[in-house]
Amino acid sequence: MPNLRVSDKNFLRGLPESPGVYIFKNSRGVRIYVGKAKNLKSRVSSYFHTNIIGKTNLMIKEATSLGFINSYNEFDAILLEANLIRKFYPKYNLELKDDKSPLYIAITKEKYSRVVRIRKSANGNYSKIYGPFPGTNTIRTILKNIRRIAPFSSQKHSKKICLYHEIGLCNPCPAQIARESDEEKKDKLTSHYKRNLRYVNSILSGKIKLIRKSLVNEMKTYSKIEDYENAQKVRQKISHIDFLRQPILKPEVYLQNPNIASDIKSEEMNELKQILHKYLSIKKLVRIECFDVSHLSGTFPTASMVTFVNGECDKSLYRHFRLKETFTDDTLALREVISRRMRHLESWGKSDLVIVDGGKPQVSVIWELLSEIMPVIGIAKKEETLVIKKPGSFVEIKLKNSGVKNLIQRIRNEAHRFAQKYHHHLLAKNLTFGRWS
């Protein structure tokens, strides 16, 4: 486990921008606080770049060194944090110090059930209770991911449609259902809401494979009737499920080998290089770029470029693109994005591989513009297929459950998240200040 001296002014530079846990120690080497982070560098830096008070200030004054362990993903970090707290019982982890009232996730017994966080000592009428969980941040992370797959209500019901509905995280909203005067539409919305609650229960019960199968069938149904907008929304939910289903390593594995996450990611990169070597001229595979486009029926189009180095994201190389035109065709949007990317070949540098979120049409556009400069492949979501263009033909490789599949999904999902983040920012800006020109 790397150990950094807090007194060293440059110690923050030694932290990676990856998920993991961090451990503050005092001068005697005693572990005084264990925390988890999606981005270790960003989280630990926050302790030293902001005005902190109370017990946090006391902790930082007492801390003389910091240890950290990279994790494969954020959920591994959650499990590892809980394991280390139970093992070492650090004095500043006050959330778990009083274990008389642990935290749980509960489903309320109401006409439109809510998903809420409770203490076990809390009184209430609940149909299901899950837990306990190590702290509010853990529960918040779990529910945040579930909500992207199965939107639900968490607030007390009122006549006003909630803010979460506006961003698609409470859909349908109970207030929306109550307002509906058409009984047929009302029944349909109610059925949709109850199905989402069944999905929440299934995920918390570990039955996520059944949900994925149901969503795949739903996506196919939308595609058959050429309702591609709803098919795309369901596809995004499937992507979130695939993220949650990435392999979770037991905390004991990290304790035995603190470098296990980096080792696994190196193996994934080597495995991908071996596959692509048969079709593309790739001398080395260290840096990978991935592009994705996000829009709402062609409006507020944005795109993202995320960069991974040695299998881990390097956010200093991320880029957002606010597209100048309104597109209904992703290939036209990609043409603009890649053209703009090519203007920065010297200042941004080149990558060893470029990935586009899409199939043959998207790959063709990027290949036409970039193939002489950087190798290009696509990732088609249907059965997670690599799409490789050769002069006059395509090669399609269906990814099995493997390290390569985990790597590609991790990169693609991060590009999608980053594109949507900027898209939602512009959408929210429009709702507040009026449409931008």
Image (cartoon, helix red, strand yellow):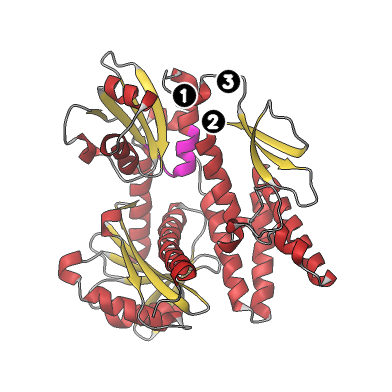
In the picture, measured across the screen, residue 223 lies left or right of residue 78, that is right
Q: CA distance from mark 1 to mark 3?
A: 12 Å
Residue at the disc numbered 3: 99
Q: Position of residue 26 (x, y in %)?
A: 29, 18
Label 3 residue SS:
loop
Residue at the disc numbered 2: 134
Q: Is residue 275 magenta?
A: no
Along the polypeptide, which appears first: circle 3 or circle 2? 3
Q: Is residue 77 magenta?
A: yes
Task: Determine if residue 44 is in view.
Answer: yes
Which segment is the magenta one? Answer: 70-79
In the picture, measured across the screen, residue 166 lies left or right of residue 113, that is left
Q: Which of labels 1 and 3 is toward the front?
A: 3
Q: Position of residue 40 (x, y in %)?
A: 34, 40
Residue at image x 62%, y 23%? 101
Instruction: Check disc 3 and give the amino acid type.
Output: Asp
Do the residues under discs 1 and 2 have CB atoms within 8 angstroms?
A: yes
Q: Residues within 10 Å of mark 1 (few under 14, many from 20)?
A: many
Q: Is residue 331 above or below residue 87?
A: below
Residue at the disc numbered 1: 85
Instruction: Check disc 1 and give the amino acid type.
Output: Ile
**Observer-nearest of 394 and 125:** 125
* Residue 373, quarter of the rendered image: bottom left
Q: Which mark is residue 51?
A: none
Q: Which residue is outermost to the right?
A: 183
Along the polypeptide, which appears first: circle 1 or circle 3? 1
Secondary structure mostly seen in magenta is helix
Task: Determine if residue 250 is in view.
Answer: no
In the picture, measured across the screen, residue 208 lies left or right of residue 302, that is right
Instruction: Check disc 2 and give the amino acid type.
Output: Pro
**Observer-nearest of 370 and 186:** 186
